Image (tube, rainbow, N blue to C red):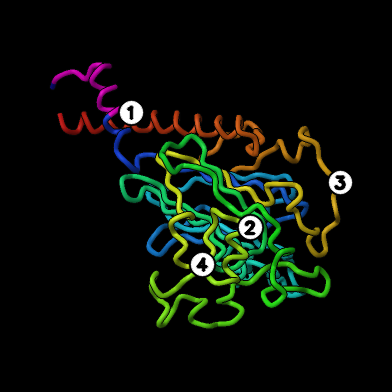
Amino acid sequence: MAPLTPFSLSLLTLLFLSTPGVFSTTFTMVNKCDYTVWPGILSNAGVPPLPTTGFALEKGEAKTLTAPASWGGRFWGRTLCSHDSTGKFSCVTGDCGSGKLECSGSGATPPATLAEFTLDGDAGLDFFDVSLVDGYNLPMLVVPQGGTGTNCTNTGCVVDLNGLCPSELKLTTSEEGSVACKSACEAFQQPQYCCSGAYATPDTCKPSSYSQVFKNACPTAYSYAYDDKTSTFTCANADYTITFCPSPNTSQKASQGQTTQPAQTSNSPEINSTMVYEGAGDDGLDTSSSSATVHVFASHATAGVVSVTVAVWRLWQHLF
């Protein structure tokens, strides 16, 4: 058997790294709202679920999850959540109906702001968007980290649409007032708004005056089912940061039953002690900052290189 020189090992590693789908992807969720958000996660059909499908994210907190290559699914934020006297868990907006903190394969009840991803799709690109097709409940921003591509850029809806929402679309509670904004489809159940029946094609289903309210406020977010041209983004080899309430002026009222907390400084222990799940560093970084996110990506890439090198070595031994 010919010896495997450092040069040939490096060459094989580079060839392996150029293959789409080798690396997994990290998603870092950051809560900049003035209240707790309970992210929900739903994987696409036939795709393995992530390590968690729902958890609490306190004000100022961040958590990182690792998704396998070619994963697809959606993230959203649940608000105004609590347990009843029997222990059943539910949320006023974005509830997934599981009765528990984990969504366990159930999606968000509209209205809810959604971040949707398909990793390692055509040409090895990730496809992602922020969708208001199912309505809106809180501001959200998706920022690619370390990716490349001509359409690899931020997207989201950072405006408080609950304040701009037409009265006929508002979801309200007696305690909190307007807490979410329904889509016209959800509110009226008519095919011209739902892009169904005779309106089930791009030629017959057009923007409505209601979807235009969403589009004018959030130009890069999906406002109705066929709003593809300005709302779908692609990246190669990126990790992603998903921020709830990215701007301070979009934060809503504190959640029901929670004590309002004072504003925190950038040195706050709660912000800096990032909690992670799988595949992220454990050095207590504030992943809401760009430098920290770059560090997480670099650590992730380094671990990937080591894993791939070992795999190439084993493959070489097996073949020769």
Label 1 packing within 10 angstroms: few (<14), some (14-19), many (20+):
some
Per the image, label 1 sits on a secondary structure element best described as: helix
Which residue: 50% across, 29% down?
Answer: 298
Q: Is residue 12 magenta?
A: yes
Instruction: Give the farthest residue toward the left.
Output: 1
> Which residue is tagged 1?
309
- Residue 71: give x, y in percent of width and height: 41, 52
Q: Nearer the viewer, mark 3 or mark 1?
A: 3
Label 3 packing within 10 angstroms: few (<14), some (14-19), many (20+):
few
Per the image, label 4 sits on a secondary structure element best described as: loop
- Residue 206: give x, y in percent of width and height: 47, 71
> Which residue is tagged 3?
262
Range of the magenta residues? Answer: 2-14
Q: Which quadrant of the structure image shows residue 90?
A: bottom right
Which residue: 32% across, 33% down?
Answer: 17
Q: Can residue 38 be seen from the camera position used here?
A: yes
Q: Left or right: 172 with respect to 13?
A: right
Quarter that holds the N terminus = top left
Q: Amino acid at mark 3?
A: Pro
User: Which numbered disc flags the more N-terminal residue, 3 or 2?
Assistant: 2
Label at residue 224? 4
